[in-house]
Amino acid sequence: MKILMITGDRALASGQKGAFYYTLEEFSKYWERIDIITPRIQNPKSKIQNIFGNVFIHSSSWSIIFQPWFILKRGVEIYKKENFDFFTVHSYPPFYNDFGGRLLFNRIRKPYALEVHHITGYPMAGGLKELIYRNLTKLFIAWSAKKSNLIRVVNKKQTPDFLIKFGTDKEKIKYIPSAYIDLKIFKPMDSGKKYDIVFAGRLAKNKGIMLLLETIKNLKFKIENLKLIIIGSGPLKSKIEKYIKKNNLEGNIELSGWLATTDDIAKIYNQSKIFVMPSFNEGGPRVNLEAMACGVPVITTRVGIMLDIIRDGENAIFVAWNAKDIADKIMLLLKDNNLRKKIAENGRNIARQFERRKIIKNYAETYQNLLHSSRI
């Protein structure tokens, strides 16, 4: 069977081995051929790139505003040549992919799935742009989902509740998790604790990173030699560096940037006492489960799949979008070794449910089974 995937992921076409790359490494084993349409990137190596032998990446040569028509043009070309069985559309504001997917469906009439990984700006907006996008989603999502055969969500409660409230057909919604954890890499290691706190993620407003910096500023006078390491990069990097310098936090915060391999990330997790994720909106976040798999207790906001799996104070700790609350919970865990140990052990049990090969197998087979059913 053959599949076309319409995505907003630019990292893949840029040659970066991010989350989507590692998903495809396993996902590709279940398909004869996978074609992927991505937005334009700077300095593409070629019009079509090939990875894993049967995965072909088609990055747009057009400006992003024309992406719906590029999706139509290239999608039709691929269909005429390869006759794919099914296609997926990564749905997110400002909905270039959704428009393109609808145009493609109208032309070729093949079944497709809308993939809604999270609702931008929900439950909390990271800024005005996210607030606008959340309101656009309220207005647009029912139209976008109308022609799709399936709507994939990656958590059981937060995203489905939003979709149903704003007019999406409940019967189309299918929970297919995307938190793929390689338990051979993300596991406890015998390593010393260099850091009190670790954060991993894109340095963007929706990750709540500035809240975490404010927390560290407040805690540095209460915890001697407090140390945070931040794994990742993104648009807020310069602002973060200025904040660190302005508040004399150079001795408390280390910026690692993106690490070269997942082994490097797992090593840093294991060298840390606590993982903190103060994100405003997420589908997962997967990084929480990676830390759990390493036996690192997690402090997280109430986002995404966390609402489905967390028992507060048992296998992780919930916090509000509030620097004081985050500081209080960090203090609680750093002072109580027994509580850290209990949460770490229970968190590992949760993470085991998301073993990479099993979850990706479920992802592929769910689509293939639906294709063979009378529903599609």
Image: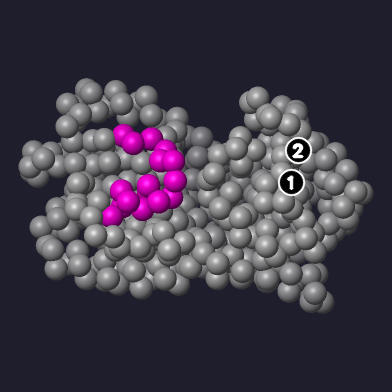
- Magenta-tinted stretch: 255-270
**Residue 48, numbered circle:** 2
Left or right for 340, reference 8:
left
Q: Quadrant of residue 167?
A: bottom right
Q: Is residue 107 shown above or below 160?
A: above
Residue at 32% x, 51% y is 267
Q: Is residue 218 above or below residue 5?
A: above
Q: Which mark is residue 56?
A: 1
10 on left or right of 55: left
**For this rendering, which residue is in front, 191 or 37?**
191
Tell which residue pokes out farthest to the bottom in this image.
Answer: 374
Q: Are marks 1 and 2 in contact (CB under 8 Å)?
A: yes
Q: Residues within 10 Å of mark 1 (few under 14, many from 20)?
A: some
Answer yes or no: is residue 302 visible.
Answer: no
Question: Which circle's residue, 1 or 2, is located before the other in the chain?
Answer: 2
* Residue 29, horizontal then vertical, whole percent: 68, 62
**262 within the magenta span:** yes
Q: CA distance from mark 1 to mark 2?
A: 6 Å
> Disc 2 on helix, strand or loop?
strand
Residue 4 position within the rendered picture, expressed as x and y whole percent measured from the top left: 76, 52
Q: Is residue 130 visible?
A: yes
Quarter of the image with the N terminus in it: bottom right
Q: Amino acid at mark 1?
A: Phe
Q: Which residue is found at the position 44% from the left and 46% from the top? A: 261
The quarter of the image holding the C terminus is: bottom right
Task: Please report the residue visible at 51 percent of the width from the left and 35 percent of the height from the top.
Answer: 129
Q: Nearer the viewer, residue 66 or 269?
A: 269
- Would you place residue 304 above or below residue 324 in this image? below
Question: Looking at the rendering, which quadrant does residue 93 occupy?
Answer: top right
What's the residue type where badge 2 is placed? Ile
Q: Position of residue 274 (x, y in %)?
A: 24, 54
